[in-house]
Image (spheres, rainbow, N blue to C red):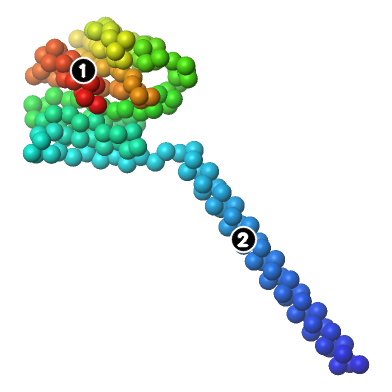
Amino acid sequence: MPCLRQAAKTLAVSVKDDNRKIMNRQLIKITFGLLIVALTSCKTTQTSMIIADSYDEKKNQTTLTLLPYGNIVFPDKWTKTSYSQVSRQHFFTNNDSTTIAVTKNPRNKYPFFKPDQTDSEFVTDFVKWDAEYWEKQGLTITTVDNQSEKGYILWQAKSDEKNVNTIFLFGSKNGLAYNFSGTSKKWTESKIKDFLVQLFNDN
């Protein structure tokens, strides 16, 4: 009888151990599954961007890559100098110290976005939203060329006192918002305007 009791105890311990192992395996599987779900959820709520810039000597053009939103290609050689977290613009200078800033982002990233907005309505609200900020900084705002029906508006923020004179092109097409600007001591205002319009039309 003692042998039977000992065998029964051994069997009970063995069963308990097996149950613990099964439960541990199930717990690991559940935890792993929840981790996968959490990671998948994070991926669906955040968009990873690949950002790079390069100069093609043969084509004499500079390319800013903003995957998954595409490229911005502009003529001649430009060197990237900085990036603004606020405007999400990438700043470039050329050999005569002219500065341009460029970016394009999904329209729904902006606080004034409405799903049913046309390109014309969006770009009008875009300029109004940004111009209000610059006016508060003491700059004079002027609409240079309103081509909202073509998807863009050229406008200017200027202050002689603060030595600021920046020309902007805000645009909208294919679900993306375009924010271009230029400032230069060498280029005329007309040259900056033409350059920004060319950028918008080409990209």
Q: Please, what secondary structure does the residue beneath circle 2 have?
A: helix
Q: Which numbered disc, 2 or 1, marks the residue that appears first in the sequence? A: 2
The residue sitting at 33% across, 33% down in the picture is 69
Percent across and percent down for residue 192 are 16, 17
Q: Which mark is residue 29?
A: 2
Q: Please, what secondary structure does the residue beneath circle 1 have?
A: helix
In the figure, 50 relative to 78: above or below? below
Q: Can residue 142 be seen in this view?
A: yes
Count every numbered label the image shows and give the total. Answer: 2
Percent across and percent down for residue 129 are 39, 14
Q: Residue 166's image quarter? A: top left
Q: Can residue 136 be seen in this view?
A: no
Residue type beneath disc 2:
Lys
Q: Residue 197 carries which label?
A: 1
Q: Residue 191's image quarter? A: top left
Residue type beneath disc 1:
Val
Q: Which quarter of the figure is the N terminus placed in?
A: bottom right
Mark 2 nearby-residue class (10 Å; few <14, some 14–19, many ≥20) = few
The residue sitting at 79% across, 82% down in the picture is 11
The residue sitting at 42% across, 38% down in the picture is 47
Which residue is at the far right? 1
Mark 1 nearby-residue class (10 Å; few <14, some 14–19, many ≥20) = many
Q: In this view, does 6 lie to the left or right of 101?
A: right
Percent across and percent down for residue 165 are 20, 14
